[in-house]
Structure formats: C-alpha cells, structure tokens
Amino acid sequence: MLSQSSAKFLEDLLMTCGPSGFEFEQAKVYRDYLRQFTPHVSTDVLGNTIARLNPDAPFQFMLCGHYDEIGFQIVHIMDSGLLSFRAVGGIDVFTTPGAEVEILTAKGHLSGVIGRKPIHLQTPDDRKTAPKLEDMWIDIGASSKEDAAKLVEVGDPVAFKRNFKMFSETCVHSKSLDDKIGAFVIAEAFRELSARDLKVGVACVGSVQEEVGLRGATPSAFGVHPNAAIAVDVGFATDVPGIKPELLGDIKMGGGAELQRNADNNPPLLARMLKIAAQFNIPYQMTTGHRATGGTDTAAIQLSRSGVATNLISIPNRYMHTPAELCDLRDVEAAIRLIVETIASLQGNETFIPGID
C-alpha cells in the first residue's frame, strides 16, 4: 500500500479547497511535493503546475491530472444576510440542499450551509421536480446584508466542506477525488520515475479548470509540446444499482485501472500499455468510455499543436460530482505502475503513428 509520505500527500491534497479558477491551495501542495524530486517545477499563468525530468530530451512524455474541483461562487448578498450563488462545473443539484460548504474569502475559510425551503413547506409539484440552484442560498449565520458583507464578497469561490476518510484499507472517501486522485497518480508516477534511468523527458502537469472546459490542459500541452501523453481522471464504476454495464462496461472498484478504446486513445500507445500490463501482471479493465471523444484533458492534449499520441487512464469512481466520492487505492496503484513501466520502456525514437508503429 501507500508509503507514509505518499499517504500524507494524498490526504493533504484532498483536504484542499479550490473550485475551477481558484486552485491556489492544491497548487501549493502539489508544488511543494514535486520539488522533492526535481528542481524543474513551475506554475504557469493559469495555475497549472508543471514538473519536469530530463527537460532537454528530444522526446517528451506528458502526464496530466486536473486538481480543480466543482464548486460554487457567490453572486449576491441578500438583505437578510443570505447569499445567492452559482455553480462552477457540473453540480448534482440533488446533493446540494443541506450540504456544508467553505467560502474562500480574503480573510480565510468561512463555513456555511446550503439552504432550501423545507420539504414540509413544498407543494406536491415542488416535490416532483428537480431542485434549482436559483431556489437555494448559502447561510453563514449573518443577520443582515451589512453583517454578511463584512465576511464575504461577491465573487468569492465556494467549495464543499473538505473531507477525507478511509472506509477500509483501500477505499478512500473525499469530496474531490474527481480529479485530485488523478493528480495524485501522476505525481506518484513522477516520483518513481525520478529514480529511473530514463531515455525520455517527463512533464507532470497538475492542470486547472478542467471542470469548466479542459482549459488548463490546452495551454500546458502547448507549452510542454509532448510527443505522447497520458491523462489520468476518474471514470464511472458500474458496480452499483441503476448503472447498466451493457452501456458503460463492467467496471468495478478495485478491479484495476480503467483503459479505453475510443477516438481519444492512440492505438499504438494503447497497445504498448497493454503489453506492459501483461508483462508486469498489472490489472486493468477495458471499456469504450461513455462517449466517443471528449470530456477529459486527454482530448485537449491530443489536439495540441500538430497532434499528440494520447491515452486516458481512469480510476473507477462512485458518486462522481457529489460531496461523497469513493475510489479504491488498488486501482490507484495499478495506474501508477502502468504509467511508470510504460514510460521506462521508451527508447525515445517512438512515433506512435497509427498503422505504422
């Protein structure tokens, strides 16, 4: 299982708050950790953290995992001291009423709770329809607009309350496993690769603003200019009621890292990864993904400059985009091993051109 230092890094990363566009806390944790393994660590103007090994090597391999999270933003302070807000990223509105949140103010974190009309006072029609964020508010216990304005400002970002817990030896619970668990995977792979004799360069990118349109991966990939790349994100575990494996594949938490065959995944690179998985007995689960293309940083990296050979590794996840996500560290460790051994196998002369390699 994870070493003590790796386990601490995972907890520190998951206990940060930073919706898309406001990833300051996780960026600092990420920078501080990666600086143990390379002097080449930087943060670009968007907030992407980029750590590099062999930065002058002709062949560059990019690893990417986004560390932004879904959240909210304060829109208006009401006369009553309650706060109206909007979503940042894809919010499951059914999980928001009653949720505890943290407002990231200039003076520090401020606790609040998302309020809604009690079910006792809802009409029968109210109970039949999905709740809307515009009918909710954030309550910080202020008694007036003046009192609230002393504590918060319009535009302050809001995150679900930080949480981290191990439900078992391998099952991890947190509000933002999507996709801090992916950012953790590539950082750990980078750590292991820093001790290897590599023939290629490696860029480890903790990316920002994925949840609002893959925005961080686009400029970071342009700057790194990789020959090939692996992005790590969460994927849908289908081992719960109501999700049909015949539509999304048979994906279980603890069954291994999820690989995909679709337009985002370069066939020669995928073939190499499958060969490595067989050689080192690394468990994996194959799927087509829930769409033919898009939805993760893989798609943005793939189309950078003149094109990049990309593959996506997904960590099976339950309850995605809620404050109570679950992942399994066995899948995390499989993903780390697969990345490390794939990159360590490269000679630096690979092209990954489909139909030729």
Image: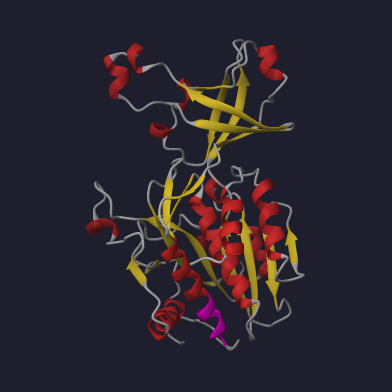
In the rendered image, residue 333, in percent from the top left (x then y), is placed at 47, 68
Residue under the point 60% across and 57% down: 8
Can residue 226 be seen?
no
In the rendered image, residue 85, in percent from the top left (x then y), is placed at 56, 27
Looking at the image, residue 6 lies above or below residue 279: above
In this picture, residue 130 sits left or right of residue 59? left
Residue under the point 70% across and 59% down: 31
Label the magenta part by its dominant secondary structure: helix
In this picture, residue 152 sits left or right of residue 128? right
Residue under the point 59% across and 17% down: 141
Looking at the image, residue 38 lies above or below residue 160: below
Looking at the image, residue 106 lies above or below residue 212: above
- Is residue 226 covered in magenta? no
In the rendered image, residue 340, in percent from the top left (x then y), is placed at 54, 77
Residue 272 placement: quadrant: bottom left
Can residue 265 be seen?
yes
Between 192 and 206, the residue placed more toward the observer is 192
Residue 102 placement: quadrant: top right
**In this picture, which residue range is highlighted in magenta?**
340-346
- Total numbered badges shown on the rendered structure: 0
In the rendered image, residue 11, in percent from the top left (x then y), is placed at 57, 53
In this picture, residue 336 sits left or right of residue 78? left
